[in-house]
Amino acid sequence: MFFTLLRLQALKSFRSTSFAKSALATGFMIFIALLLLSYVFFAGLFLGRIIELIAEGRDALDFLNSGLIYFFLVEFMYRYFIQKLPVVELESLLHLPIGKKRIIQILMLRSFISPLNLIALLLFLPFGIQDILEQYGTLGFISWFGTLLFFSWTLHWFMLWFKQRFEDSIIGLLVVFATLILGGGATFMGWYNIGELIAPMFAMALTSLIPLVVFFLLCVVAFILAFRYYVQNAYLEDLSDEEDVRFVNQSFGFFSRFGVAGELANLEWKLIVRHKKSRTYLMLSAFFLLYGLIFYTNPQYQRVEGIHPIFIFVGVFITGIFMIQYGQQFLSWNSGNFDFFLSKKAGVESLVKGKYLLFLSISLVCFLASVPYAYFGFEILMVHLATFLFNIGIMVHVIIYLALWKPKPMDLNKGAMFNYEGVGAAQFLIIIPLMAGPYLVYLPFSLLIGDYAGLIALGISGMIGLLAFKPLSQLNIQKVLSNRYEISSSFRQEL
């Protein structure tokens, strides 16, 4: 049955009108995956030597045992953002005369065949053979390495359940933040070293089979948890209703004060919270609000007087992260209903104005959320204020102008990770003004007068942009109107 379903999936791909494009993209992704896995394997070959250089006289195995928990924290994060769920295939199989449990078993087996499940194997197998097998024999090697693998595979099955149960919800986001804070954050802040709490378990695995048995049972429990959840919820009604009902009444009432553009901004917000890819960008925006902790707490960037130039980029990133991510694909989000706006009087103009209103509102929310960074110094708050004004006065127009260069269609229900729909050359070029634009204003004043003069120049340029908002936004509106039929034609292309 497994091979029969694989054959059906292959026939579906071969018969698709976009087979050539899909095959090319798949081949490229396979090449990238093999390249990355080869890097992991070579890192595993030299892992012992790398640990000896880092451990500073400590036993390599003890050092690794105390650091394994951080590997699993990283694995938890990349599985959360990258690991795919077998829901799409499920929708196309439920109508077939096959038992539901059998379908779920096959889909879960397919999900297990993933490069993510090879990372722990390729990284730690060479080290185990070179060091553990020689010191502790075959039994110690099997117990230690098996414990590690079952830990990794437990995360795989757990993530299948967790993402389907809590993906894009506030509970899921809180769990991810708690994992980071209680894991790596606690060690970084000096509260406690979670690695030292977990190390005895892997040390025991060298001489006992108990950890191996425990994690084997945990892996089985995680599999059963995911399997039962999928069986209980494997109905087309559940799969379709969950996306529509969960956020059905989510809206910003104050948008209605801005006329038709405000109503369209409200509709755009509903689009964001109802679709998988846009929700992922919204969640990442909230996640990257913590970006400043990497720089503001680093002694390398601390100065007795003045402001480190890197803080300007950090401020632009934090206060404009949603505008940067979501704005890169400005019209692609509406590729499925762009013709609707063409058919309405002033529809395209109202659509663009609504997006402007949404970007400015969420950027304001990001700035207010970043106010607690004042804990690291009043100058940080000034950086965020200046970069916020520059973002909403200048950068928003630049990003939208570049994003309007040959926009491409996209499927909103697909995830954001490794999904390049709606991405063209313009999306890669946006990084240039993002990096260079603020510094073109800040550095001349900072070098000639002082750092605070540079911040004032950034803020004033942003305020000038706000005063000239109408003519600047009209440039982008006219660009959309002049290319509306070409854009509409490209959006009708099949993905």
Image: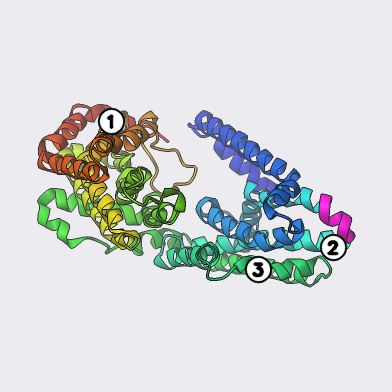
Where residue 209 appears, x then y in whole percent?
82, 70
Mark 3: give few (<14), some (14-19) or many (20+) Cα within 10 Å.
some
Q: Which of the 4 quarters of the picture holds residue 472?
A: top left
Circle 3 residue: 196
Disc with the residue nearer the chain's start (2 vs 1) = 2
- Residue highlighted by disc 1: 487
Q: Are marks 1 and 3 in contact (CB under 8 Å)?
A: no
Q: Which region of the structure is painted magenta?
A: 130-137
Left or right, residue 328 beside residue 176: left
**Element type where label 3 sits in the image:** helix
Amino acid type of the residue that numbered disc 2 sits on in the rendered structure: Gly
Residue at 48% across / 67% down in the picture?
Answer: 178
Q: Amino acid at mark 3?
A: Glu
Asked if the stretch drawn in magenta spans residue 131, the answer is yes
Q: CA distance from mark 1 to mark 3?
A: 57 Å
* Residue at screen point 83% across, 49% down: 130
The residue wearing badge 2 is 140
Mark 1 lies on a secondary structure that is helix
The reply to whether residue 290 is visible in this rendering is yes
Residue 425's place in the image compared with 125, above or below, is above
69 relative to 457 in the view: left or right: right
**Secondary structure mostly seen in the magenta stretch:** helix
For discs 2 and 1, the disc positioned in front in the rendered view: 2
Amino acid beneath label 1: Ile
